[in-house]
Amino acid sequence: MVYSTDNLPILVLCDKNETYKTSPTEKHKNVCKDLLKNLKILSNYSYIDRDTFFTGCKNLNNWLYFKEKELNVSSDIINKIFQAFNQIENVNYHFLECPYSTFDKEFNETEKLINLRIFNNNIETIQSLLKDRSKSKNCNLKKYVYECVHIYNIMKRTYGFPQDCTNNPHKNACDIINDFYKFYSLYIYNNNDILHKFPELSSNTNTNIIEGCPPEVIELDQASPSQSNESYRSIIQSVSPALGVMAGIPPFLALIYNVNINFT
């Protein structure tokens, strides 16, 4: 893998044992280089647009969850890479800090929560896509929203999260569920600028039937990686050609990714 010479001063950290406090494997080094490169890119946004920076930071953490799972890299290793970046003596990298965020390891629905957190983090981008007369017709975009509604309904019914999550044993999950309700209600449901009528949040909502979409649209939670990548290709390219070159992120994340971070 070839990296820009601009990144070489920070990427040397990935070849040092002291970064990991152990002998790194090649996959550790590769994840490290991708992560440091993207943290450096994010640092540029800290001077330009704080909102873009923090949205990008959240999406970077979303991507990391899937990358850790794909490569079986521990959160301890990832945390040490973040620490190494924070110790770089370059004030330009640390105007704002992008912290590493992990999920409650005792909660068994982490991947479903990630889907909802991606929705929450990118709600303005999703709304913009749904308002667009051309992009809003794409069934995979609508299917993603319906899948999030389905996840919300199941988790709300299963766990009965309260409105106040302060003392909930799964506070992080509770906050994500409540944020989804808030954002979906404000930005998507009954929005007159969105042509498609999306369902209300209810345990009785049928999320398997989408008006204007054929029944063979691939289920997000059933599709193989190759099927998902193929089915989302057109939407990814229509949002931004740059998204098509990202590697190692779920198609639905690439679909709504609105920060120019290069995961290669």
Image: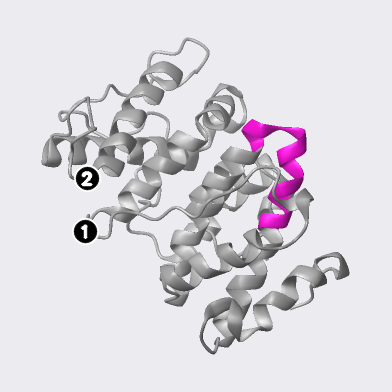
Tell me, yes or no, whether the highlighted magenta stretch contains residue 51: yes
Helix, strand or loop for the magenta stretch, by majority: helix
Please state if 10 lies on the left or on the right of 39 as rendered: right
- Residue at 54%, 78% in the rendered image: 20
- Locate residue 81: give its quadrant: bottom right
Q: Residue at x 61, y 24 (%)?
A: 132
Residue 234 sits inside the magenta stretch: no
- For the residue pair 208 and 49, the one nearer the viewer reads as 49
Q: Residue 105: image x %, image y %?
A: 27, 60
* Quarter of the image with the N terminus in it: bottom right
Residue 214, position as x, y percentages in the image: 39, 41
Task: Give how far apart the Cα atoms at labels 2 and 1 are.
Answer: 9 Å
- Going by the picture, which residue comes out furthest to the right? 5
Q: Amino acid at mark 1?
A: Glu
Residue neighbourhood size for the residue with mark 2, other residues' Cα within 10 Å, grouped as few (<14), some (14–19), many (≥20): some
Residue that label 2 marks: 170
Q: Is residue 89 above or below residue 46?
A: below
Left or right for 227, reference 233: left
Image coordinates of residue 6 in percent, x first then y, are: 86, 65
**Residue numbers of the magenta segment:** 39-52
Q: Can the viewer see residue 102 in this picture?
A: yes
Marks 2 and 1, the one that precedes in the sequence: 1
Q: Quadrant of residue 37?
A: bottom right
Going by the numbered disc 2, the residue's amino acid type is His
Q: Residue at x 69, y 49 (%)?
A: 94
Say which of 167 and 170 sits in front: 167
Q: Which residue is mark 1?
A: 106
- Mark 2–mark 1 CB contact (< 8 Å): yes
Q: Position of residue 3 (x, y in %)?
A: 79, 72
Image quadrant containing the C terminus: bottom right
Question: In this rendering, would 144 be left or right of 8?
Answer: left
Q: Residue drawn at (76%, 37%), measured in percent from left and top? A: 47
